[in-house]
């Protein structure tokens, strides 16, 4: 689809048109809002390491409160893509692989990381397995779009997902809910928090879900696929150590186990056997029962001291993860190729921040960051008896990174401010691998490795921005950001340590923040242009992920977020994302489907003009929430619609997920002064089978794993 007018022109035109009726208003940007006048709730974010109004931050941010997430049916990270323009959330095994504006890394396991960073209470979560978590005791989720190369420089090329949990305090209070849904699903959540004394507060949040019936059946053995069980717990302890000093300790634990990813031949394709798949849309026919078993836990310590003009913050964190997996790579009931193994993950990070008080014309942040991570396949096995071999191997990848950063914002006037930031990162990656190749016919063993390599890189990233308030309610901004994503190694390369260069992304952005009609209409938008170099791409070799560098891509597009409150109790939301992401000229692998079944490798071809993987050109989300008073009770009706245009799974642009649409809805009755609630809810009401993962497996088949089908149920909640 061709865009005849540059998106940046559209955004600026919209900004000035919206601003015209408001010029007669008071132009003092510091004037407080009249909270008694009603309208949309104020949103406060920490996108620049300090609390600021969303409408004053020159960064593209989509933010949600806990109540908003509940009404929209968003309970896990993967659900965020349905309500956030420009964000899609495919998965890889147990792990989520988010992409913002086409920037992301589908394979982020065994020491490699995603291009979209996840932070929880200021702590970076590098593990893909930890990215799929239940939302419990959440205060806010904010999605920051575009490279965050200064303040959140750890692999935030595409942006980041920032999760903030509740702070305990005051009298003890809590809530609990229990639910039952289709697929024989039981769930429960509970939260309890409050002050133990004047200087000490604590809380505990727990979440449990057990889907005992899967969405489909493995026709090979009659067992369910898509069944899962998860448990999560999180506790926060806040202590006042003095008039200006505080400490916060957070502990968390998550365990997810289930029969996934469940691979089957992609619809409309013919596998190597020449026999079309005959099961229902969520069924599989595999000689290996899929298994994912992920355990993650961690602890963090946040110490802060207020010096009056600035606050010193120290964040120390340790994370520990183990993921066990088994799956049938070719998705057939034959012993052709399957994979199993364990991925341990150990991380320690330390960050020091010195943040100005926010008073005066100059605000600044200085910081130091240290990161150390160890992960890999320890061990893993490829079983390919039909191909005549079994391969045992172990790979270990270590990362040690140091960074120093600073960012300052200076108000030239009451209406205009400029922001400049720099971050210098020095990082050392090391890799070690060994294994054994077992030939089955003839029978012999051949060693693989040992292999070892170490590489060091130093990168400078930056941010430059200017924002201007046209009046009290409308701000426009322009920014130039550079971000980079850590390099690494192909995690399945045993005989040779194949180094993957860091990604570098230069982003140019124009944005608009506006609140109109006495805060009953909020329109935020941004237009951007990306120059993306050394892109980390992925493929699959014998069922396991492999990573390599592409050369360059050019991307442009826009995001639009609209929230309106046209009447008391009625809130409407709309989001639109357009991404034109195309590769430049470099060689990529190509495949073709064979008439008799299976796929074959073709000579490499040019990537020029082809789309980035897992990136739909268009995404649309629409939402409605209506609160109806019923005497002393209240009924809340919610509905959400999401549409994605088609996307391709690999740079060759052969296998694709066609366009699809999803609908969620809920009805919640709150009564007894909001102490109790009863909610009926449904997700993916159309029971749409859409790909969460799609890849080519030469020479066997194009393989797909579908996301969850239709779910619905009832939840009873109580507050105390």
Image (cartoon, rainbow, N blue to C red):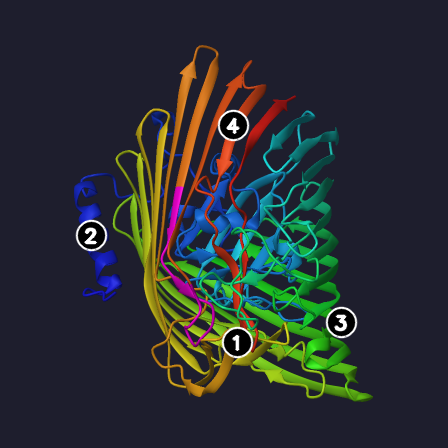
Identify whether 443 is placed above or below 517: below
**Mark toward the start of the polypeptide (2 vs 4):** 2
| Residue identified by numbered label 4 | 680
241 displayed left or right of 511: right
Q: Are marks 2 and 3 in contact (CB under 8 Å)?
A: no
Instruction: Say which of marks 2 and 4 sits in front.
Output: 4
**Mark toward the start of the polypeptide (1 vs 3):** 3
Mark 4 to mark 1 CA distance (whole Å): 43 Å
View extreme (right): residue: 444
Mark 1 to mark 3 CA distance (whole Å): 23 Å
Residue 481 visible to the viewer:
yes
Mark 4 to mark 3 CA distance (whole Å): 43 Å
- Which residue sits at x=45%, y=56%? 87
Mark 2 to mark 4 CA distance (whole Å): 43 Å
Mark 2 to mark 1 CA distance (whole Å): 39 Å
Instruction: Say which of marks 2 and 3 sits in front.
Output: 3
Magenta-colored span: 641-656
Secondary structure at numbered mark 1: strand
| Residue identified by numbered label 2 | 16
**Mark toward the start of the polypeptide (2 vs 3):** 2
| 321 within the magenta span | no
| Residue identified by numbered label 1 | 536
Query: Which one is nearer the viewer's eye here, 604 or 699?
Result: 699
Q: Give residue 71's position: percent from left, percent from top.
A: 48, 34
**Mark toward the start of the polypeptide (4 vs 1):** 1
């Amino acid at each position: 689809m061709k865009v005849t007018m540059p998106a940046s022109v559209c955004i600026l035109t919209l900004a000035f048109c919206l601003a015209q009726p408001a010029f007669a208003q008071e132009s003092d940007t510091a004037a407080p809002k009249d909270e008694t006048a009603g309208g949309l709730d104020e949103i406060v974010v920490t996108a620049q390491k300090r609390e600021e109004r969303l409408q004053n931050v020159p960064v593209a941010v989509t933010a949600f409160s806990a109540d908003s997430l509940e009404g929209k049916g968003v309970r896990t990270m993967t659900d965020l893509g349905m309500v956030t323009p420009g964000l899609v959330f495919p998965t890889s095994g147990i792990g989520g692989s988010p992409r913002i504006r086409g920037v992301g890394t589908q394979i982020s396991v065994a020491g490699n990381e995603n291009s979209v960073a996840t932070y929880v209470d200021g702590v970076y979560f590098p593990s893909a397995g930890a990215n799929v978590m239940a939302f419990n005791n959440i205060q806010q989720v904010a999605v920051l779009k575009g490279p965050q190369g200064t303040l959140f420089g750890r692999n935030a090329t595409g942006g980041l997902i920032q999760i903030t949990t509740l702070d305990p305090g005051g009298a003890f209070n809590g809530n609990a809910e229990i639910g039952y849904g289709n697929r024989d699903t039981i769930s429960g959540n509970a939260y309890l928090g409050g002050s133990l004394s004047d200087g000490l507060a604590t809380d505990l949040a727990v979440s449990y879900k057990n889907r005992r019936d899967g969405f489909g059946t493995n026709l090979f053995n009659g067992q369910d696929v898509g069944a899962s069980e998860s448990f999560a717990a999180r506790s926060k302890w806040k202590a006042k150590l003095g008039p200006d000093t505080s400490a916060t300790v957070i502990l968390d634990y998550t365990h997810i186990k289930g029969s996934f990813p469940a691979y089957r031949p992609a619809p409309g394709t013919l596998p190597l056997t020449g026999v079309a798949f005959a099961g229902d849309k969520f069924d599989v026919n595999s000689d290996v029962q899929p298994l994912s078993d992920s355990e993650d836990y961690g602890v963090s310590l946040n110490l802060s001291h207020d010096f009056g003009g600035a606050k010193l913050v120290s964040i120390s964190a340790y994370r520990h993860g183990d993921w066990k997996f088994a799956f049938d790579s070719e998705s057939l009931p034959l012993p052709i190729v399957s994979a199993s193994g364990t991925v341990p993950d150990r991380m320690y990070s330390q960050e020091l921040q010195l943040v100005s008080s926010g008073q005066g014309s100059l605000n600044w942040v200085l910081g130091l960051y240290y990161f150390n991570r160890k992960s890999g396949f320890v061990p893993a096995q490829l079983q390919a008896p039909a191909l005549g071999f079994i391969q045992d191997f172990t790979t270990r990848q270590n990362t040690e990174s140091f960074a120093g950063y600073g960012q300052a914002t200076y108000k030239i006037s009451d209406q205009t401010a400029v922001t400049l930031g720099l971050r210098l990162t020095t990082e050392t990656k090391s890799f070690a691998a060994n294994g054994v190749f077992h030939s089955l016919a003839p029978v012999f063993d051949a060693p693989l490795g040992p292999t070892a390599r170490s590489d060091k890189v130093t990168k400078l990233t930056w941010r430059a921005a200017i924002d201007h308030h046209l009046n009290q309610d409308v701000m426009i901004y322009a920014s130039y950001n550079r971000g980079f994503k850590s390099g690494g190694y192909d995690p399945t390369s045993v005989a040779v340590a194949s180094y993957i260069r860091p990604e570098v992304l230069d982003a140019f952005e124009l944005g608009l923040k506006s609140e109109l009609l006495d805060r009953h209409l909020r329109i935020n938008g941004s237009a951007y242009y990306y120059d993306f170099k050394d892109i980390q791409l992925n493929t699959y070799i014998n069922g396991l992920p492999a990573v390599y560098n592409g050369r360059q891509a050019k991307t442009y597009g826009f995001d639009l977020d609209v929230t309106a409150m046209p009447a008391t109790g009625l809130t409407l939301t709309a989001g639109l994302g357009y991404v034109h992401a195309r590769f430049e000229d470099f060689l990529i692998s190509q495949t073709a489907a064979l008439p008799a079944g299976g796929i074959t490798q073709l000579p490499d071809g040019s990537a020029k003009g082809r789309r980035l993987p897992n990136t739909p050109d268009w995404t649309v989300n629409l939402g409605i929430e209506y609160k109806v008073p019923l005497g002393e009770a209240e009924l809340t009706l919610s509905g959400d619609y999401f549409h994605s245009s088609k996307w391709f799974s690999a740079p060759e642009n052969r296998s694709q997920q066609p366009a699809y649409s999803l609908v969620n809805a809920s009805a919640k009755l709150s009564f007894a002064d909001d102490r109790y609630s009863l909610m009926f809810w449904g997700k993916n009401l159309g029971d749409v089978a859409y790909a969460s993962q799609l890849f080519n497996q030469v020479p066997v088949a194009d393989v797909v794993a579908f996301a969850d089908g239709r779910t619905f149920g009832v939840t009873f909640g109580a507050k105390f």
